[in-house]
Image (cartoon, helix red, strand yellow):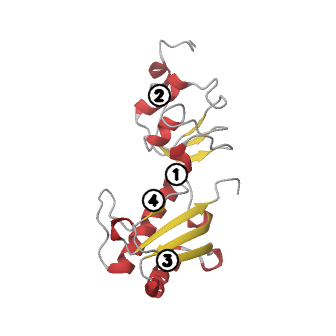
Amino acid sequence: MNKVYPNAAAALAGVMKDGMIVMSGGFGLCGIPETLIEAVRQTGVKELTVISNNAGVDGIGLGVLLESGQTKKMISSYVGENKTFAQLYLSGQLGTVPGKMDLAPGGIEGQTRQMMENIARVLNANGLSFDDVFKCLVMMKDMGEWGAFNKVYVEYFKPDRLPARSAFGAAGLALNAAVEVECWAYVGKK
């Protein structure tokens, strides 16, 4: 059996498939298989679980697979300088319709439901669920709408798995949204 290939694409031909687990060596930006990672990206496979000691950086190493949305789950002991990887767990979410800058209809309840669905999509894309969320920060345009917000919010968590939560009223949110939520999720060993 000849295991020598003319290039990385030839080595991966017929091997890559959606949903597979990929393990990558190297440390930081030293010794990483950049050419092979780029070839994996070019195959277009999706739903990858990627295991490495780090997540690369934006635009380099495993960072290209995160940026292209081909990873379902990233198992890494070090986030390092990968802003894309870190941002998945730190950014606030609004109740915007996917692919648009329009807020979901239905006032606070409609925006809350869409926002929670947006958060679920980010969690699921990284192999997580609301069970992994341990802290949320809620920002609301009108704290008087807390009851309507909370009615929808709690539907997304198991009663015994409600995360710690802080909330405050905000004079103005992006797009004049009624609510924005940031969540932190545990991505370590379970």
Residue 121 numbered tag? 4
Badge 3 crowding class, 10 Å Cα cut-off, few under 14, some 14 to 19, many 20 or more, is some
Earlier in the chain: of badge 4 and badge 1, it is: 1
Q: Position of residue 93 (x, y in %)?
A: 45, 63
Identify the element where label 1 is drawn.
helix
Compare residues 175 and 97 and report the one nearer the observer.
175
Badge 1 crowding class, 10 Å Cα cut-off, few under 14, some 14 to 19, many 20 or more, is few
Identify the element where label 3 is drawn.
helix
Residue under pointer 2:
38
Badge 2 crowding class, 10 Å Cα cut-off, few under 14, some 14 to 19, many 20 or more, is some
Q: Marks 4 and 3, how far apart in space?
A: 15 Å
Residue ID at (34%, 60%): 98
**190 shown above or below 145:** above
Badge 4 crowding class, 10 Å Cα cut-off, few under 14, some 14 to 19, many 20 or more, is some
Earlier in the chain: of badge 3 and badge 2, it is: 2
Residue under pointer 3:
153
Q: Marks 2 and 4, how far apart in space?
A: 25 Å
Number of the front mark, 3 or 1: 1
Q: Marks 3 and 2, how far apart in space?
A: 39 Å
**What amino acid is found at the position of numbered circle 4 in the picture?**
Arg
